[in-house]
Image: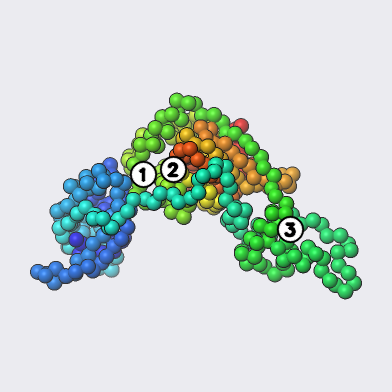
Amino acid sequence: DIPASWGISSRLKQLLYKYTPRGVPQPWLKKVVKKNYKDQQTGKHLGYAIVCYRDGAEASSVLLAMDGLRIFANEVFPADELQAGGRAADLAGDSFILKVRAAEHGDSAPAKTLVLSQKVPGLDPPLEEQLRPLPIDELVRRVALLQPAQSPQTAGEDGMRSDSEQDGSLAVRAETPTHSQALAMATAAYTKLPRAVRHVQGRQVPEDLTARLLAELQSLRWPAKNQRPLLSSDRYLVLLSSSVNECYGNLRQMCSELMDWADPNYHYSAIAVTKNFVSSPHIDELDRTYGYALALGSYSGGELCVDSIDEDGIHRVIRVETRNRMARVDGRNVHWVRSFTGGDRYSLIFYDTSEQRPTSPGSPVVVDW
């Protein structure tokens, strides 16, 4: 139970940050109800929150540590926020006894298992989905590049348009199209002129290191909520380099060892750690430079694919084998993962969104750095 005045997500997050036991990562605050009922003795409204931890053992440790704990506002908020005009001024001098209980059935749910067809390895998402992350101007530019040059006799004296001009799926419109229109044009253009496919393999990672990384990932206590929920994966964890939380200390140490082997001078602001990431064409727009990708597990398929236009003007999809292999990949290009079967697929993606060492977009994929 929590007082209604504390029933605000931002306030509860600060409370949890202050009182969560050491070694436990900040949980997923799934639901907050500000007013659930009135206390019969005080007449004040009380509410509740549903808080999700990585597993039952972790939730039990928090329950033991926090149930019956007296919460003091002056321990949770800085003094200036409790002063007149501060965002928590209404809580000045406030305290209450926190009541914690285990969630009953229906209060919460485990992370959803990935619902995607994985019956056949090596399948790409639909062409339209591969192109969807591209902005309008890039879609229009590609349509123009793919159109055959018009001959001088394209239009007659009566001003009739050529066949390609009449075909709305290929014509570059005089007015600015919507994204849906540009996407439809680009999809039609690539259907007629498919991109070339180039197959490459990343650098083989030492077997001892891949074995230890895989064992660590298989036993990992994943966050209660995926940290990039719009992408298709069973589990998604982001390890920020700036974080001091040691919940994933073993994994961080192994990742550091991996980068010492791969590129000791590379600066990464975070590591994306995934389980069964698949499909999900996207562009990592916040990346300031290239990144590194490694996949682990006993599976078939699951190649990393990167869309590109070569310097010679050839439109390509680069299929990269990253199972037990590492590749340098520029996430500022559209990329996705092909379907896979046979077992779980884990991946580690090292990337940098800081301004420490930015680079201009270059080769989409490098395997011999």
- Going by the image, does 339 lie left or right of 155? left
Q: Nearer the viewer, mark 2 or mark 3?
A: 2
- Going by the image, does 358 lie left or right of 160? left
Residue 6 drawn at (x, y percent): 24, 63
Q: Is residue 328 above or below residue 307?
A: above
Identified by mark 3, the residue type is Ala
Locate the N terminus by quadrant: bottom left
Q: Secondary structure at mark 1?
A: loop
The residue that disc 3 covers is 144
The residue that disc 2 covers is 275
Q: Secondary structure at mark 3?
A: helix
Q: Give the mark nearer the N terminus: 2 vs 3.
A: 3
Outermost residue toward the bottom in this view: 158
Query: Counting other residues with Cα less than 10 Å from the Cα at mark 2, is it few (<14), some (14-19), or many (20 or more)?
Result: many
Disc marking residue 39: none
Could one spot residue 220 in this view of the protein? Answer: yes
Residue 106 drawn at (x, y percent): 28, 58
Foreground residue, 114 or 190?
A: 114
In 3D space, how far apart are the residues under numbered discs 1 and 3 (Cα atoms)? 46 Å
Q: How is the image coloured?
A: rainbow
The residue under the point 86% across, 67% down is 155
The residue under the point 26% across, 53% down is 16
Residue 45 drawn at (x, y percent): 19, 69
Q: Secondary structure at mark 2?
A: strand
Q: Is residue 110 above or below residue 212?
A: below
The residue that disc 1 covers is 222
Identified by mark 1, the residue type is Trp
